[in-house]
Every structure is written in C-alpha cells, then in structure tokens.
Image (cartoon, grey):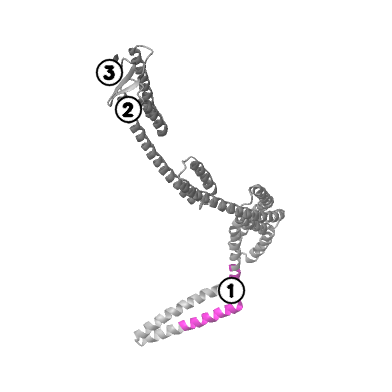
Amino acid sequence: MSSDPWGRVDETGTVYVRTADGEKVVGSWQAGSPEEALAYFERKYEGLVVEIGLLEKRVRTTDLSAKDAQAAIDHLREQVDAHHAVGDLDALRARLDKLVETVEARREERRAQRARQADEARHAKEALVAEAEELARSDQWRAAGERLRALVDTWKGLPRLDRKSDDELWHRFSHARSAFSKRRKAHFAQLDAQREEARKTKERLVAEAEALSDSTDWGPTAARYRELMAEWKAAGRAQREHEDDLWNRFRGAQDVFFAARGAVFAERDAEQAENLKLKEELAEEAEKLLPITDLKAARAAFRSLNERWEAIGHVPRDARPRVEGRMHAVERALQEAEEAEWRRTNPEARARAEGLTGQLQAAVDKLKGQIEQARAQGNTAKAEKLEKELQGRQALLDQALKGLQEFGG
C-alpha cells in the first residue's frame, strides 16, 4: 500500500482521496505501481488547479459574462466533486465558492451599471427631446436644422431603453423634427412667394428707370429716381439668380442719367462762374457812381449797367445774394437821391414848409412879446411859463427852417 497526505492506494489498487467528509474513491489502478497511480491522479489535480486559476484570472481581468463564468465554474465543480484527482479538493471547492461570490458580485455590479447607463440614457434622450422641441419653435432655420441633425446622430449613439419608454421619447423627438421641417418649408415657400413678388416689382422699377435714363428734365427726373430707389429698398430681395442682374440694370440706368446731368451741370457751372465774374465787374463799376453828385448822369449810367447785368444770365446760387446785394445798394442810393431831389423841387411841399415856418415864426414872436409884457408887469411866474412854451415852439421853428433849407430856400 502507498499513501501521501491527500490520498492512498490499497492492496487492491483502489485509489482514495482524503476530504473533510472522509476518504472518497478516486478510481482503480492496475497498470503500474501505487506511486505511479498517486502521481497520475495528482497530475489531474494540478490540472484542475491550473484551470481554476485561469478562470479566476479571466473573471478578474476580462469582460467574461456572468453566465459563461458560472457555466465554467459548474463544469469545474463537477470535476472536483467527481473525486477523480488526488489533492486538496476542499480547497478547490472553497476557491470555486469564492469565485461564485465574485461572479455574483460582478453580476450585481453590471446590473447596477446597466441600470445607471439606462438611467443616463433616459436623461440624455429626454434632454435631446426637450432641446428638439425647443428648436421646433426656432426661426433660425439653418442653425436649428443643423442642430437637429446633430441631435439625431447623438440619439443613434445612445443605448436603447425599454421599448415603451424608447418609443414614446422617439415619437416626441420625431414629432419635433417634423414640426420644425413643416414650419421651415412654409417659411421658405412664403419667402419664395415674396421674392417672386419682389422680382416683379423690381422688373417694373427697372423698366421705368431705363425709360428715364435719357431724360433731360433734370430736377423732376432726379426726384423720381430717388423715389424709385426708395421703392426698390422697400420691395425686398428677389431670388438670388435675378437680384444682381436687376440691380445692375437699375443702377446702370441711373448712372446714364446722372452722368448726362453731371456733364450738363458741369458746363452750366462753368458758364455761371464766368457770369459771376462779369457781374462782379459790373457791381464794381456801379459802386464807383457813389457818392452821387450828378443824379441825372448817375441814373443814366446805372440804367446802362443794369441792362448789361440782365443780359449776362445766372450765377451760382450761393454767390447770388452777395453780388446782387452790391447792385441793390447802389440802386437804393439812387432812389434816396431821387427822393431828396423830389422833395427839394416839389412846389406844394415847399409852400407847406414856408407856411409852417411862417406860422411858427409868428407864434415865437408873439410869445416873446407876451414874456416882455409879463416881466414888465412883474408877473415872473407867467413869464417863466411862457418861456417854457417858447422853447418848444423855437425847437419846432428850428426844425422847420432846416427842412426849408432842403428846398434851397
């Protein structure tokens, strides 16, 4: 008989293994010595040790599923429980039991992880739905459309939830996208209609602008072009393929008109500048008539200057008040001289002036006599009163005499 700490072979060749529950028959060995029998079943034990060690490593370091791990454990446990090996089988059972605990803990951990992932996926999809529903009301068509497409890609990358929850959230998500697409389609349909209306309006404006381009009615036509420009801006934009061409035609027609007007105005400005120079020379010549000493000669000279003035034509608008003011000043001086001459030579006015002077002189002489009489009578108060009255009459007499001198008298 042969034995070791974990097994023995009896006289009949039966091999036993020692366990906590007592000896268990491993098998029968007839082909060799008992030592060889023990060595054979010990090698089988070592094989089990290696397999259990490999499984422990796979459970610890790989993503082996709990189901597959448990199947491997059960397979190894069957081999251990079959007692076809010599060694510390109880230790192997303990390792397998511990490995079961590890796998179960891993299963719970993965179950919790899946629950967390599902919860995160639910929150993520709910957030996507909320953002999509917000975007569905947006008028930022390009940005919102691009964002919705990005949300679809994000959705596809998220795990599925339970069918009911996933279908409900997808329905809301899809409805938001459809609502946005419907609004965007309606918006661009309306925009297309507006642009078509703008094209028709601008075609009409272009036709009128081109018809006016050869007009020489400068003021009204320029005003009408300003009105056409205001109408152009108010019309909005036409389709992209028409807008630039219409604008080039519209602007080109205006350019033709304003270029022609500019050439005419440049010629007119040159002519008016020359007219200004001539009128300044006439104004200077007219100013030499002042002061007026010979009214008749000055009047004739000014009349000749004025005829030449009227024949010259327009001057620049901003220079007109200044140069015309110089001629008007000379004209006013002539008018004042004529009025003075008329007063001097008017017989009726002279007679009235002489009559008034005579009356005032008589009144002064009378007052002087009354003053002398009052003083002679010693009536000083009356004399002083009459002297004040005399002062007023004397002042009037002096003024009347001065006016009479203007008549040469």
SS state under label 2: helix
Q: Residues within 10 Å of mark 2 (few under 14, many from 20)?
A: some
Residue where numbered disc 3 is placed: 5
Q: Nearer the viewer, residue 149 or 311?
A: 149
The x, y position of residue 89, in whole percent, is 32, 24
Three-letter amino acid code at the position of disc 3: Pro
- Crowd rating for badge 1 (residues with CA inside 10 Å; few <14, some 14–19, many 20+): some
Is 46 situated above or below 142? above
Give the labeled residue for mark 1: 343
In magenta segment, residue 343: yes
Residue lying at 38% horizontally and 30% vertically, measured from the top left? 74
Query: As rendered, which of 301 and 120 lies closer to the eye?
Result: 120
Q: Is residue 83 left or right of residue 360?
A: left
Magenta residue span: 336-364
| Residue 93: mark in rendering | 2
Q: CA distance from mark 3 to mark 2?
A: 18 Å
